[in-house]
Amino acid sequence: MSKRIKILKTYKIFIDGKFPRTESGRYTQLKKDNIPLANVCLSSKKDIKNAVLSARNAFESWSNKSAYNRSQVLYRIAEMLEGNKNQFLEELILQGVDSKKAILEIDQSIDRIIYFAGWADKINPIFGSVNPVASSHFNFTILEPMGVVAIVAPEDSSLLGLISSIIPVIVSGNTTVSIASEKLPLCAISLAEVISNSDVPNGVVNIVTGEKEELAPHLAQHMDVNALGLNLENKVLKDKMVFEATNNLKRVVDISQYNIQESEFEAPYIVKNFMEAKTTWHPIEKDFTSSNKY
């Protein structure tokens, strides 16, 4: 009897709550010790366009949800990730992560989601303000989500790096298009499976896999992307994306300045980086018909 050929799982991309195959039809095999582990899609420029369109269509509905509701949705992601720990543990070990480090990475990922979920309804009370002005006006400053944020996840972290890049962005009402780790992509699509089965509306999170050198510049050039969150060690690619972003006035946030493994990453300023301030003036109405008599 001939030896059975193992059927490898094909990890598809995640766009608009669905798992299409890449438009390009290309894929690569993730290998360990020259043994194939899985098939991974190599996304194209068209996939990037589809993902950005999906994120843009989802933005209005997601940003209009109450902060409390968004925090509950994020908490649900953490709940489902807790229930799927074994799957992520298996994938991390499969990609070469030590079992103890893999368990720690999963626990940190769950805790990080819960941490940022708690900031959803606290950002504006802390960073918003009532401003003193000389005229007869009330002057308020509040923070609002920016829109569609493109994320380039770090290479050396399959799960924690992607979660730490996405969650602080969507908690305030932004939507995202993320390029997963090129070297360790498996947990990214498994995370997408968790997100698709949670309460996250379609299009809020979009995840593509493939070669960053090819895909990242398309996000920087896309006119419907409002900001970039970069966690890149490749300085040449980072400089190229920053250059492209200046041509269309995107905000660029260098996430790599924070150590995602440490507690320093758990700070509301990371959420604030992906929001913009809106100042409102409102006249003070004076009632001249009434008077105080003593």
Image: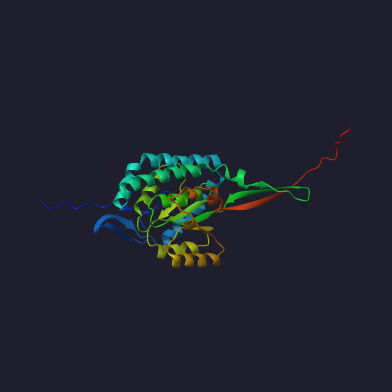
| Left or right of residue 22, residue 124 in this image | right
**Which sits in the foreground, 271 or 285?**
271
The quadrant of the picture occupied by the C terminus is: top right
* Residue 16 coordinates in the image, percent (x, y): 44, 51
Identified at 36% across, 50% down, the residue is 187
Identified at 33% across, 49% down, the residue is 92
52, above or below 88, in the image: below
Identified at 49% across, 39% down, the residue is 72
* Residue 191 coordinates in the image, percent (x, y): 39, 47
**Which sits in the foreground, 267 or 179?**
267
Identified at 46% across, 55% down, the residue is 177
In this view, the residue farthest toward the top is 294
279, above or below 245, in the image: above
**Which sits in the foreground, 101 or 190?**
101
Q: How many marks?
A: 0
| Left or right of residue 51, residue 137 in this image | right
* Residue 41 coordinates in the image, percent (x, y): 34, 57
* Residue 230 coordinates in the image, percent (x, y): 47, 59
Can residue 272 be seen here?
yes
In this view, the residue farthest toward the right is 294
Q: How is the image coloured?
A: rainbow
Can residue 54 be seen here?
no
